[in-house]
Image: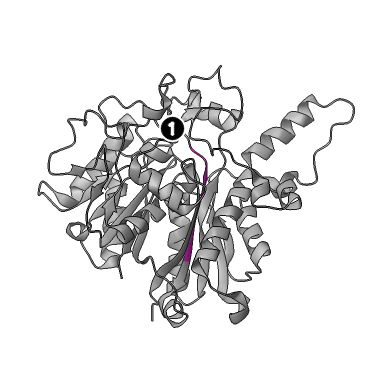
Amino acid sequence: MLHRVVITGVGALTPVGHDVETFWQNVVNGQSGAATITHFDASLFRTQFACELKNYDATQYLSRSDIKRTDLFTQYALIASDQAIKDSGFELDKMDPFDVGVIWGSGQGGMDTFEEQVKEFALGTGQPRFSPFFIPKLIANMASGMISIRNGYMGINYTTVSACATSNTAIMDAFNYIRLGKAKIIVSGGSEAPITPASFGGFSALKAMSAHNSEPAVASRPFDVNRDGFVMGEGAGALILEEYEHAVKRGAHIYGEITGASMTADAYHMTATHPEGIGASKAMQLALNEANITISDVDYLNAHATSTSVGDLSEINAVLSLTGTEKTKLKISATKSVTGHLLGAAGAVEAIICLLSIRDSVIPPTINTAILDPAIPENLTIVTKEAMPSSVNVAMSNTFGFGGHNSIVVFQKL
């Protein structure tokens, strides 16, 4: 017997809001989080702006001891998961702690710690030393470990890594473990703190990021004919996945149900998506099959669309392989135009957007898209400029990552 899986709590720490409702209102209102970088001097790089967390102060959320022993990506995970756990309202003392797990994702882990420590070692005078916290802060699984330690969750606990598909992969894994009866509740999502000289410089050298330095707020322009690359972001998104009967029994608020999830690989290129979207199309179809619906039943697609010339169109080709040339009720938007691309945290943040679009019956906009790429056919509806009021019963979230990873999750209204 497979169990139904619902979402009973959400938490977000993003460039456009440090809590879910602020984040959501800024996404709906199309308020860009992009600005010139303040974390370090990026003047020598091709790209010099990003979607940083604004006015982030860890001491508002965490103890000094926790701050000392955690990298930023783990801090972000703890803050977002705290929000989601509080929102869900489940009480551990009324449960078996082995029934509650954590499956978290991060594409890079403790990059800030790695850079800082290696730099100190290389430039140190006398006998160079590494901090005893170097490895614990660096390793990517520490976010899931620290969420578990902080809350006493003793069930399934590990970290997924599939580049920018990472947190959708984590959500899918959590979904499957609960379906199989191996957990009652799993804290899932992703966090990323990639705005560091090495990480940012590497992406800049790849020429994958927009170089629209004069006007950062309009740089991320998915589907626009003049798009020139993605805008990096940082932060975290957290979701509480729960077995349906368990949630109902305790009277939990339910945001929606996960009814399908799937992964495929492009087997094509290290960094580029397949131009025809073959792997993405198959992943979407498998997720829809699992949900026992078709693309014609989907009201909203939160597209991966990062504002790259090849990637946006390969995703459109994947969608077209399912819709054909027929006009459907499907509405598509790319909210990375607002938040930037949070890499391993993107899927979790966008999952929350899907759930809130279901809750509030609104499709958030793709901002900055002034001239729609003529390669996008008229039978597809891209929501641009302003949010669109629209009933949403089914929402689908696409994420794709370097290495050819495709991860799709389908959410439905109860």
Q: Residue at x 35, y 25 (%)?
A: 228
Q: Position of residue 291 (x, y in %)?
A: 28, 66
Location of the N terminus by quadrant is: bottom left
Q: Which residue is mark 1?
A: 231
Where 138 falls versus 371 (above or below)?
below
- Tell me if residue 239 is in the magenta stretch: yes
Left or right placement of residue 119 versus residue 109 in this view: right
Where 267 falls versus 208 (above or below)?
below
- Tell me if residue 127 is in the magenta stretch: no
The kind of residue on which mark 1 rests is Val
Q: Main secondary structure of the magenta part?
A: strand
Q: Residue at x 32, y 31 (%)?
A: 221
Camera-side residue: 148 or 385?
385
What secondary structure is marked by label 1? loop
Q: Residue at x 59, y 81 (%)?
A: 94
Where 242 falls versus 317 (above or below)?
below
Left or right placement of residue 209 versus residue 291 in this view: right
Residue 139 is at least partly visible in this image: no
Query: Dividing the picture into quarters, in which one does residue 368 lie?
Result: top left
